[in-house]
Amino acid sequence: MTARHIVHHIPVCPFSQRLEILLALRGRADAVEFRVVDITKPRDPALLAKTRGTTALPVLETPDGRIVKESLVILRYLDEVLDGPMLRRRDPAEHAVESMLIAREGPFTTAGYLFVMNRDRARRDDHAAKLLSLYRDIDAFLCEHAPRGPFLFDGFGLAEAVFTPVFKRFWFLDYYEGFDLPDGPDYRRVRAWQEACMAHEATGQVTREEIVKLYYDYALGAGNGALVAGRAVSSFAFVPRWQDRPWPPRDKYAGTASDAELGLAV
Amino acid sequence: MTARHIVHHIPVCPFSQRLEILLALRGRADAVEFRVVDITKPRDPALLAKTRGTTALPVLETPDGRIVKESLVILRYLDEVLDGPMLRRRDPAEHAVESMLIAREGPFTTAGYLFVMNRDRARRDDHAAKLLSLYRDIDAFLCEHAPRGPFLFDGFGLAEAVFTPVFKRFWFLDYYEGFDLPDGPDYRRVRAWQEACMAHEATGQVTREEIVKLYYDYALGAGNGALVAGRAVSSFAFVPRWQDRPWPPRDKYAGTASDAELGLAV
């Protein structure tokens, strides 16, 4: 493959980061041109025409102009189309194992996002319990299929590329909800997996500070660049840069800090 | 591949039928031994040990004793491991297109099952509206990627194997809810697709009469072999055979018919 693919994305989005991780692992960062979409502004009509009106990101454009949506579909597509050995396991039974683990990612991600976006303090424990039950399920899966670890197979693979961006987004749960995996045998294996995933050199596209600052509005219940009442600038704004803003307040249930307090006043 | 795989299944289950369709299309019905599980009885401890306590079906056992769960994972696994040309599109971009369509199946199936299991007559229209919105989304997808049709590509393929069993289960919506696709341009393409899928010779594993009779308890809100209050036998029972039972009453909101009226008294 010589022609370049284009991916339209939000740089901090976990569903885009897994594509970047794949490219890093495959040594093919050059194969895709990433074009940044500012979700705090109206969508470019030219891109809307290409996607036929849908706004979910990332979206991939092939060199001949075809559009591929859905993060996991794009991930598997790129893995197939890039030159060189694929990231997925070649053996069909091993690939089935990683696919079973990947099938757990949707409910896991949803549980974490519903938790961070929850606005009812009384429901906090229910959200934590739901997410912990999914962690235990992943723990049991890893104990069955990869008891020694740390990874599902002999190195960082497709399932790790899928989950690691989500683990890193869950920094927002640590910061805004004080959520952490409990000690104890029910979480030992998944904790080791999560730590190995997050420490891997191919996954450094985002930092904890970036996630915590950009996802502040999620912690207030406003996703996808929506504006929180009483504010004029989204925490997802590109300007001012997150590096130049202070850390947001941790207490998400107290209501929003002002644009000025968040360093968002231009 | 010479050794046989085993699939533990409920014969009427849509998530198993798609495996049977794949095998029929690939001309490899001999490659899998199907073992029937009676979900109206306690699960066999030997099978529970193999699945590590989970009860969802189908479950595949490889010739060397490995366990694969999740209908779509099993489907793709079998497609890879069987001798001969795969059902999936070989071209990665075409495969991405069928995968995007397959990604719509989960919400589509869920909407139909929630509809048939709904017990609140006042919520009937909301369920119908939700399902119709998903039909329109599939219609738009097909108009974009396969305007001429009837199939997504030049014949019955992987996406068709995934959806057809669900279309056939939705006979229960026709019978118990009087649900049908409206006429008009918003549904023309998906209607043609659905009709072509359901008419294909590889998809005759179940009949309308079988679906309507076996899923009667779903229409009363009781899934997976659960017993309806006031009844002693599940509509999913193997004995008496569905062929020997009368058609159930259509009005699901009136409460259950008796075991005797349903032909279920042994």
Image (cartoon, coloured by chain):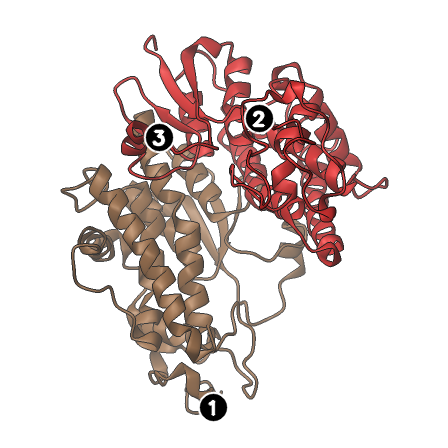
Chain colours: A red, B brown
- The quarter of the rendered structure image containing the N terminus of chain A is top left
**At 74% from the left edge and 26% from the top edge, which residue is drawn?**
A195
Residue A155 visible in this rendered orientation of the protein: no
Q: Percent from the top left, x then y, of residue A142?
A: 69, 36
Q: Chain of mark 3?
A: A
Instruction: For label 3, count other residues whose C-alpha is less than 10 Å away and answer few (under 14), some (14-19) or many (20+).
Output: many
Element at badge 3? strand
> On the rendered structure, is B255 left or right of A235?
left
Residue type of the residue flagged with mark 1: Ser
Disc 3 versus disc 1: nearer the observer: 3
Q: Quadrant of residue B168?
A: bottom left
Residue type of the residue flagged with mark 3: Val
Q: Quadrant of residue B111?
A: bottom left
Disc 3 versus disc 2: nearer the observer: 3
Q: Nearer the viewer, residue B174 or A170?
A: A170
> On the rendered structure, is A234 left or right of B156?
right
Alpha carbons under labels 3 and 2: distance apart: 19 Å
Q: Percent from the top left, x then y, of residue B127?
A: 40, 67
Q: Relative to residue B241, is residue A189 depicted above or below?
A: above
Q: Percent from the top left, x then y, of residue B250?
A: 34, 83
Q: Nearer the viewer, residue B198 or B94?
A: B94
Q: Is label 3 on the same chain as label 2? A: yes
> On the rendered structure, is B196 left or right of A104?
left
Alpha carbons under labels 1 and 2: distance apart: 53 Å
Instruction: For label 2, count other residues whose C-alpha is less than 10 Å away and answer few (under 14), some (14-19) or many (20+).
Output: many
Residue marked by disc 1: B258
Residue marked by disc 2: A161
Alpha carbons under labels 3 and 1: distance apart: 51 Å
Element at badge 2? helix
Mark number displayed over residue A68 = 3
Q: Quadrant of residue B102?
A: top left
